[in-house]
Amino acid sequence: MTTNASPLISAAELAQALRQSQRQGDQDWLVIDCRFNLANTQAGEAAYAQGHIAGALYAHLDRDLSSPKTGRNGRHPMPSPEAFERTARAWGIQPGTRVVAYDDAGGMFAARLWWLLRWAGFEAVQVLDGGWQAWLAIQGAVDTAMPARTASAFKAQPRADWVLSANEVLAQLSQSGQQLLIDARAPDRFRGENETMDPVGGHIPGARNRFFQHNLQADGRFKPAEQLKAEFDVVLAGAPLQTVVHQCGSGVTACHNLLAMAQAGLPATRLYAGSWSEWCADPARPIEH
């Protein structure tokens, strides 16, 4: 997989690739199940145990794709490079491995793994377009086995310039034209209404709203690249891409917008990983409604 390959793979493409790999053994494919439920954090793992794409491992959002919460660093803090390196090694990721992440929520959680691997310097990762539902629709192979993989010597090479801290976001608020924040939350939460996840409603001053669900078609697959490009052009309104900073409630669905922009053929932009849940934990930080 080259760096300019699509960040998405269809269920049919994945099924064919897995069959070919099984026959020929010439490619190490690793499928990772990222199903998760924010209201019931054990539901995704339970669903995995009941049935998953044959050969898939499981990644838990809280344990594997986040670091511990302190009450001031957001609801899903990014794992440290060292912690994520240990996780990737346990999964057996190495040069030549091709990773496919999936969930049952339109890529909401799989996009987090896709972004983390790329942040760690690993490019050969894609998200299953349409996720678990698309796999079932083509009657893809399903099992309940929990496969063992040989640990690898994966080395994280984190791209520090892909991530901004709260202080960096705050410092750029007063610098006109230096930062375009794109908030992936639902419009009502962006406006400070119906806030159920965080103790404070509102958004970071100057942010624009691009609800991550707008990246999807009715069937749960991503919109065509040309349509995504046109829609993000509206959000950007001519702002330079180097000023774009993605955020959401906790740094998870922001990755969905990053994935959609990649699918649209746009270059990588930055992430404020702590997002609103970290931002609003400090009452000294400004907010808008």
Image (cartoon, grey):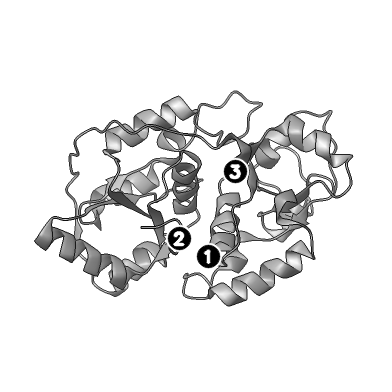
Residue type at the position of mark 1: Gln
Q: Secondary structure at mark 3?
A: loop
How far apart in space, not on screen, are marks 1 and 2 (Cα)? 6 Å
Residue farthest to the left?
23
Quarter placement of the N terminus:
bottom left
Residue type at the position of mark 2: Pro
Question: Given contact means CB atoms under 8 Å apart, are the residues at marks 1 and 2 in contact?
Answer: yes
Q: Residues within 10 Å of mark 3 (few under 14, many from 20)?
A: many
**Disc 1 or 3, which lies upstream in sequence?**
3
On residue 263, which mark appears? Answer: 1
Position in image of residue 272 (x %, y %)? 66, 41
Q: Nearer the viewer, residue 232 or 274?
A: 232
On residue 7, which mark appears? Answer: 2
Question: Given contact means CB atoms under 8 Å apart, are the residues at marks 1 and 3 in contact?
Answer: no
Q: Is residue 177 visible?
A: yes
Residue farthest to the top?
70
Residue drawn 67% across the image and 74% down it? 230
Please tell me in which quadrant of the rendered image residue 95 appears: top left
Q: How many numbered marks, from 0 up? A: 3
Question: Given contact means CB atoms under 8 Å apart, are the residues at marks 3 and 2 in contact?
Answer: no
Q: Nearer the viewer, residue 68 or 22?
A: 22
In the image, residue 130 sits, relative to residue 57, either above or below, namely below
Residue type at the position of mark 3: Gly
Q: Is residue 102 visible?
A: no
